[in-house]
Structure formats: C-alpha cells, structure tokens
Amino acid sequence: MSVDRAALYGLMAEFDGPQELLAAARRAREAGYRRINAYSPFPVEGLDEALELGRSWVRPIVLAFGLVGAASGFLLQWWVSAVDFPINVGGRPYNSWQAFIPITFEVMVLFAALSALVGMLALNGLPMPYHPVFNVPAFERATRDRFFLCIAARDPRFEPEATRRFLDSLEPIEVADVPE
C-alpha cells in the first residue's frame, strides 16, 4: 500500500524481537534520523538511550509539588493552631511543629502522587484515543509479541524511497506506510 507524501505520517518497520528493535533504533540514529519512535510490548533496556530521549520532567515536577504540598500542609496547621484558633492544650506552645509532621508528610505524599499522575499523562500526551500508527494493521501485535520502529515523515532527513530502503536494510519482517 503506497500513500502520497502529503498524507503520509511516516514509515514503520516490524521486528521479531527486542534486540533487533534496539539495533535498528541505534542504526537509525547513526543514519541521522531524529523523529523516531519505538513501540514494544514491554520495556526494552537501552532503547531510551538509543532513541536519545533525554531525561524525563516527571521527577522535577514531583519534587516541586511534593515540596509545595509539605509547605502547604505545615502552613495550614501552623495558621490554624497559632493564628486563627489558638488553643492551649496541655501547656504546649501554639507552634508545636513536632505535632505537625505526620500531616505535613501526608499532604506532601498526596501532592507528589497527584502531580506524578497528571505530569506523566500530560507529558505523554495522554489520553490519546487516536494515533496514525493505529492505521497499520500489523500494529495490533505491538502489545503482544511484535516490535516496531517508526520514522516520521516530518523528520528533516525523511525521503520516502530512501527511508524505505534504509528500513529494508535493517532486515525487518515488513516495512509499512503509516497514513495520516
């Protein structure tokens, strides 16, 4: 099935195993392709380095919101206990920070967990009910037993015939057009 370049999302190669996918991803990066994505039924060690994905922003987001949560939990307890409604219980000071630690920790964990979920979904562009790779019939096996490497048509080095020859040189099971 051949699709004109205007309606082409990219080209996708199908591989039998994770090592073939990893080798193909490395060779694609060495060949100068930059708009590459890999799909596999399980994590493949070294694939993120081969694709040069870089570091994720999830960890800094979780740290920042965890600190905001801890500060919010502490300040709320301090304000209620020392400023808004001070009650002397057992002769302790109004700002009894030792008593604030459990709630401060719980609010920190809550903010961090929620920011991890929302940050991961946002950075991954999820939910994604449609993606052009879903148009390739063989792609349904990506969640079971096949491994795919897709080079996007918007890659500066992408030329349909040259990219197809390159993917064929990687010895995949099949190279398919990915229509928009």
Image (cartoon, grey):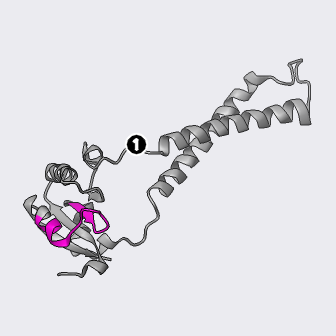
Per the image, label 1 sits on a secondary structure element best described as: loop
Q: Position of residue 13 (x, y in %)?
A: 17, 64
Query: Which quadrant is the N terminus positioned in?
Result: bottom left
Q: Classify the position of the C terminus by image quarter.
A: bottom left
Q: Amino acid at mark 1?
A: Arg
Where is residue 112? Give x, y as percent. Answer: 57, 42
Which image quarter: residue 170? bottom left
Q: Position of residue 95 (x, y in %)?
A: 83, 24
Vertical placement of residue 99 versus 71, above or below: above
Q: Give the residue drawn at x 27%, y 61%.
A: 143
Task: Report which residue position mark 1 lands on.
Answer: 55
- Residue 89 occupies which quadrant of the picture? top right
Q: Is residue 126 left or right of residue 92?
A: left
**Would residue 109 be seen by someone viewing this image from the given angle?**
no
Placement of 156 over or under 1, stated as above or below: above
Which span is picked out in magenta? 148-165
**Residue in view at x 28 percent, y 69 percent:** 153
Q: Is residue 166 magenta?
A: no
